[in-house]
Image: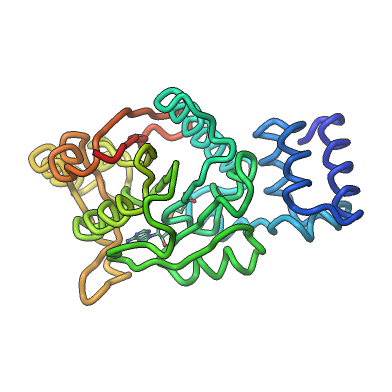
Amino acid sequence: MLLIDEAKIVAEADGLAARGATVNEVLTLLRGKLSLDAFGLLLIGLPRADLPALSKLLPRMASDETQRNFTGNSGEILLGQTVSFVRALAYNYAALRNCSLSGARIMDYGCGYGRITRMLYYFANPEAIWAVDPWDLAVSLCRDAGMLGNIAQSDYLPASLPAPEAAFDVMFAFSVFTHTSRNATDAALSALRRHIAPNGLLAITIRPEEYWAVNPEYAPQAAAYQAKHAAEGFAFAPHGRDTVEGEATYGDTSMTLDFLAANYPDWRIEGADWALVDPYQRYVFLTPA
Ligand SMILES: C[S@@+](CC[C@H](N)C(=O)[O-])C[C@H]1O[C@@H](n2cnc3c(N)ncnc32)[C@H](O)[C@@H]1O
């Protein structure tokens, strides 16, 4: 729930929008006066009948069902996880680059319905933000919700992405490399490398070995997947759908930092992090080597 002072700022932003302010003017007001969490609460509640002008300018939130289908959670619980990652991204970018996310050119790769993309409006104007996903449903959900900025569909096994090359200060893929096959992982990391700026930072999430034991779906085979993870540094269980040219590119994936370091020499691991809200999504920060 927004505090009374925050609700007043939101009402002021609605008034500004009603008087014809641009979305960037409205975002400047909201960013300056709301915390990241309050901004997120506002966005997950849109559209709202009492905020008609703001509801026209800013995207409509996905349904609870869509949120759960993409992430397993919804509403404020999911927002807590989203904000936790976004804070870690901002903190690590500041720590590693001595730079704020404000005004950065950012790509959300494997954006889904735009859960995390929405939070980026807190830092950068929409024209600097790219939301990319290979799934036509994800891209349609973003477009139909009125997501701002650049929305583009990529390939499941991309050679490059539909976005400018060598251009992005920050790229991230949350809960994407936790699902991709070896070939899809190789293709995506190589494609992302083409688009990162020379001093850019890529944040990905990976699953640790423990994942196989904590997901009850894998209880019977957990030991086998853990053994593969330990021996090869990479374990993948295909979901059996989402095949590309006969190959399953999507499932559940775990990998080690050593595997990343050994197999992707055009990236260098600069840092790692995780958050209590989901210890099985480990954040890895990569820089172009
Ligand atoms: C679990 S969802 C996460 C969505 C979003 N990143 C989030 O955290 O809300 C995984 C996303 O990865 C996308 N995806 C599937 N295969 C992919 C691939 N080969 N490359 C990039 N993204 C992929 C899916 O379409 C889906 O939107």
- Colour style of the rendered protein structure: rainbow
Nearer to the camera, 59 or 207: 59
Q: In the rendered image, which quarter is residue 206 located in?
A: top left
Residue placed at 78% from the left, 35% from the top? Answer: 2
Q: Is 273 situated above or below 162?
A: above
Residue 193 relative to residue 39: left or right = left
Counting the numbered discs, the total is 0
Measuring from the top left, give residue 80's x and y in whole percent: 58, 36
Q: In the rendered image, which quarter is residue 143 located in?
A: bottom right
Nearer to the camera, 78 or 197: 197
Measuring from the top left, give residue 88's x and y in whole percent: 48, 30
Farthest residue to the bottom: give it.
Answer: 245
Specify the quadrant that holds the C terminus.
Answer: top left
Measuring from the top left, give residue 64's x and y in whole percent: 61, 56
Answer with the quadrant where ligand 1 appears in the image.
bottom left
Nearer to the camera, 72 or 258: 258
Residue placed at 56% from the left, 43% from the top? Answer: 78
Residue 276 relative to residue 117: left or right = left
Q: Is 152 situated above or below 216?
A: below
Specify the quadrant that holds the N terminus.
Answer: top right
Residue 40 relative to residue 115: left or right = right
Residue placed at 23% from the left, 76% from the top? Answer: 245
Farthest residue to the left: give it.
Answer: 231
